[in-house]
Amino acid sequence: MKLLQNLGLALLIFAITVFILTLGLSEYKLSESSIIAKTDTHKGAILKAAKDNQILDKTYSNSISFVSELRKTIKDAQAKQLEIPVPEGVSEWDHKIGDWEITNYVNSMVKPSTVGIIKSHRSLIFLLTFGLGVIGALCYIIPLFAQPPGIKNNGIYHSSMTRGLKLNVRTFFIISTMLGVLVYGVIKMGSAIFLPLLTLAVIGLIYYLVIYKENQKMKTPPKSASPDITGWVGVIAGTLLIIFYVLLYWTPEYITNWIILVNPISKFLSGNDASQWFLYGLLYTIIVIVMGIRMISKYRHNTYQIIRTLSVMFFQLCFAFLIPEVMARLKLPYYDFKNIWPLNYTFFFDYNINNLIASGGIGIFMLVWGIVLALIGVPILTYFFGKRWYCSWVCGCGGLAETMGDPYRQLSDKSLRAWKYERYIIHGVLVFAVIMTIMVLYSYFTGSSYVLFMDSNSVRSWYGFLIGSAFAGVVGTGFYPLMGNRTWCRFGCPLAAYLGLVQRFKSRFRITTNGGQCISCGNCSTYCEMGIDVRAYAQRGQDIVRSSCVGCGICSAVCPRGVLRLENGGDINKRTEELRTIHISEDQIKILS
């Protein structure tokens, strides 16, 4: 069995290595047929600039130099168009090339300009990457089913992959990522620096409130938890994930080779060419399914965990991946029925509303479905089942966190300081999402992009960049090996904040405790991905009422004494307010509160 696992690990590492190396295997040559633009005027201008710059039919050995020359050529075409008066009968933006169109044109032209081994041996390379990766992972996972069921000491704090980071190293990653995102945001947004400066001011305010105000209130400063040494293999894994998300979100023109590999699958499912989002969806789905099998092998002693894992695998495969692709083939709007506002922050954007309305009855149904689910479905379902109905059973972000992220769940910071950061940040993101939505709806109904002194277009662009891309992707997943698997869910997801508010104050769901049986082993706190010190609640006999709890139930699954139970009781609200201890005397046993 150990030999099979070692073989599987070797195959997985080989597949990942080949996958990375494929980025440098192609050549690039811009031809007249690969110049794709929305109007003939734009295409003609770009073609002329390409001839002037002598890049037409020139072969480039790497994407970096080709993309650089192509971008410069399109900018030259843009400048030339500005010098030419707009012809009569032609709209201004059919003649001019907008700044936002440059990136779109670069992305659309790199793929047809790609030549070489990737296109000529696509099936072989797909098998060497995706195929061997899945086989290798399964070879490593399947032998786990032969081991005795149940949670045991598996050396998670001794492995360099899952050990975590010392506080100074973790702080370096957080500050570097935050500053890097803000600087890139300023560059990306051009002259719109007000929102980046406002973001920096909010970050400073949160830091002040936690470090100074809260410390004065508590008298003793709460410290953040961290290991004594850093797991450098985990740092490498986290760095690779961060780089992947940067390429995916902001520079997809450099991962064209990966997109080409999955193009036949996209054609089969939707009839469309693959984009970076199809590549991401396919990778995401494969990882959730394969790592979901690993999750089942680890927690197969617990029926709740098996069913819950199968649920997130099903919703990711069907609702998040297959159904939207099939709908695209049927010429219907691409729509994920389980994605809810404010997590689905683009739902109320003008182009989405117009697209749904223009799609007729099915589009109107999708629009009404999204509104009813967000405003009525979420409170009702959360009242009866807590936020676990979505965060742990349906959500794609939670599905990836529970499957691929499970080896890192112990890295969530359980300190009081981390909890204080969590409260300020996640509710700040929720407020940001609500304000942005109000602004875009105001602009939609009035036709004015300005609300007071702020441009709603800039606000929604900055939200998409900062929260939708940087926080949810780069940090949310890239920081799995650095800060735990639920970093996004815990600190950034606005829907989790919305669900948490309902769960905290008006829900029948709680994790109840039987403090008299607790032996303080600490398994529950160690395995809590949301940074809750579950043991502290159990020792006091107090039910867990934290709004951040996603009801994954792992704390209950790893408890050796059955202290913790997931319940939906009618008297939950009363019991969670009581601090219950057992008092034993010679003549009676009493529960004191």
Image (cartoon, rainbow, N blue to C red):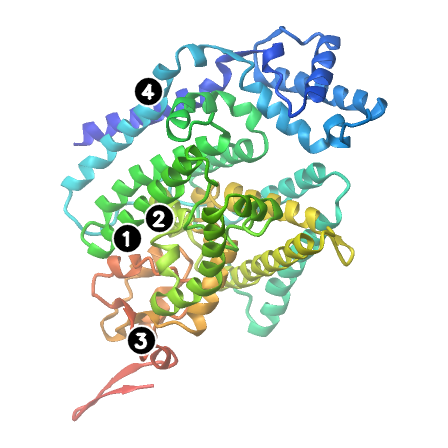
Q: Do the residues labelled 2 and 1 touch (CB within 8 Å)?
A: yes
Place residue 577 in its image quadrant. Answer: bottom left
- Image coords of residue 45 (percent x, y): 73, 17
Viewer-side residue, 344 vs 118: 344
Q: Name the residue tied to disc 2.
A: 402
The residue located at (69%, 37%) in the rendering is: 188
- Secondary structure beneath dot 1 equals helix
The mark nearer the N terminus, 4 or 2, is 4
The residue located at (42%, 68%) in the rendering is: 503
Q: Are marks 2 and 3 in contact (CB under 8 Å)?
A: no
Mark nearer the viewer, 1 or 3: 1
Q: Name the residue tied to disc 3.
A: 541
> Label 4 is placed on what type of residue?
Leu
Q: Name the residue tied to disc 1.
A: 308
On screen, residue 145 above or below 118? below
- Whether residue 158 is visible here, answered yes or no, is no
Q: Name the residue tied to disc 4.
A: 127
Mark 3 neighbour density, 10 Å: few (under 14) some (14–19) many (20 or more)? many
